[in-house]
Image (tube, grey):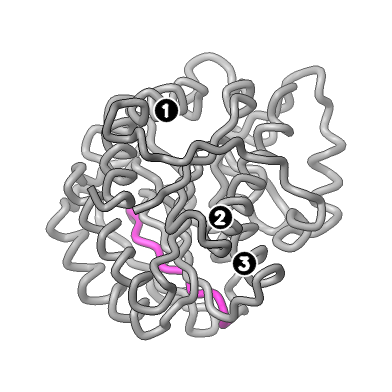
Amino acid sequence: MTVALFTHPAALAHDTGPDHPECAERLRYVLRALETPDFAPLLREMAPEASREQLCAAHLETYVDSVFALPRDRETLIDGDTVYGPGTLEAALRAAGGAAAAVDAVMEGWAKAAFVAMRPPGHHAEADRAMGFCFFNNAAIAARHAMNRWGLKKVAIVDFDVHHGNGTQHIFASEPGVMYASSHQAPCFPGTGAVHERGVGNIINLPLLPGSNGDEFRQLWDMAGLPKLHAFAPELVIISAGFDAHAADPLAQLRLREPDFAWITAELMAVADGSAQGRVVSLLEGGYNLDALASSCATHVRTLMRL
C-alpha cells in the first residue's frame, strides 16, 4: 500500500540538553530503521511548517503568540520536562505542519496512509499550555485541519502511547465529531485518563496497570476500544503512535512488544478500511529506548504498508 513518510532535518535541531529522554537521537534511530530495502516504496516528503491558522484551530491565539514570543537565542525551561531552545520553534511548526500535510496526502489520495516522523511530540499540549515535552498538539491540529479543509464530520484519534494524551482530551472533550480513544498506564504521568472521563461520550480511556502485557492490552482494546471505534465509523483515523509502552522503555512499566504494535496498527487499519476508505495518518509520539523505538516504528510502518 502506498504510504508517505513525512520528516524534516529541523526536528534534529530541537535540542533538549544532555540526558533528556526526548532527544534528537530518537529520530535518528527511527529514520535509520526506515532506510532498509523494505521501506524503499515509501514516498518520502519534507514536512512543511504549520500556518498560524492551522495552529489556532487547535490552540488559543494567545497561547500561540506566547510560544512565538519565547527567546530563540537561549534555552528556556517551560517546566521540569519541557525545554525550548533556538531550534525548537521550527521543529514544532514542522511537526504540526507535517501532520496537516499528511492529512492532505491521504485526502488527495496519492497516499493511502502516512507516518510523520517528527519531534517534538504533541499529545500533552493543551489548548493553552505546553507540557510533557510537547508544544503544539499535532494530532489535534491534524484533526481540525481534516474537518476545516476537507469537511470531514467524524475523525478518530487513537493513542497507544504509554502516557495519556491529556492535551488531546482537553481540546476535544466537548466535541462529538472527534472520538479520542487512549490506552495508557495508570497511575502514570500526567495523571489523567480515568475511565470516568468520557467528555460528551466521545472520550474512551483504557487505563492499564503497571506491568500489564500484550495480552491484557489486546483484550482491553478488543472489548472496550475497537467496537466503539467501529461503531463511530470515522472518516479518518489519526494515530498518536507512542512506543513507550514497550517492555524495554525506561519511563514506564507496560510490557508490550513489537507484535503488539503490529496488532493494534492492523486493527486500526481495519477500522479505517470500514468507514474511512483506508485513510490513516500516524504521528510519532513517545518512545525512549532507542533500539525498541526504532524496531517498533519499523514494525508499525511495515504494517501500514501491508507488508
Q: Which amino acid does label 2 sit on?
A: Ala
Between label 2 and label 1, give the one nearer the viewer: 2
Residue 69 place in picture, x, y as percent: 87, 37
Q: Dot 3 surroundings within 10 Å: few (below 14), some, or many (20 or more)?
A: many
How far apart marks 2 and 1 lie (CA) works out to 20 Å
Q: Residue 31 carries which label?
A: 1
Residue 295 place in picture, x, y as percent: 27, 33
Q: Mark 2 points at which residue?
A: 105
Q: Which amino acid does label 1 sit on?
A: Leu
Q: Mark 3 points at which residue?
A: 146
Of residues 40 and 117, the one drawn nearer to the viewer in this rendering: 40
Q: Dot 2 surroundings within 10 Å: few (below 14), some, or many (20 or more)?
A: some
Q: Which residue is drawn at 27% across and 34% down?
A: 38
Looking at the image, the residue that sits furthest to the top is: 18
Q: Earlier in the sequence, mark 1 or mark 3?
A: 1
SS for dot 3: helix
Q: To which quarter of the image does residue 221 belong?
A: bottom left
Q: Is the magenta stretch mostly helix, strand or loop?
A: strand
Asked whether the residues under the numbered discs 1 and 3 touch, taking CB atoms below 8 Å apart as contact, a structural biologist would say no
How far apart marks 1 and 3 lie (CA) works out to 26 Å
The verdict on residue 177 being magenta is yes
Q: What is the magenta range?
A: 176-185
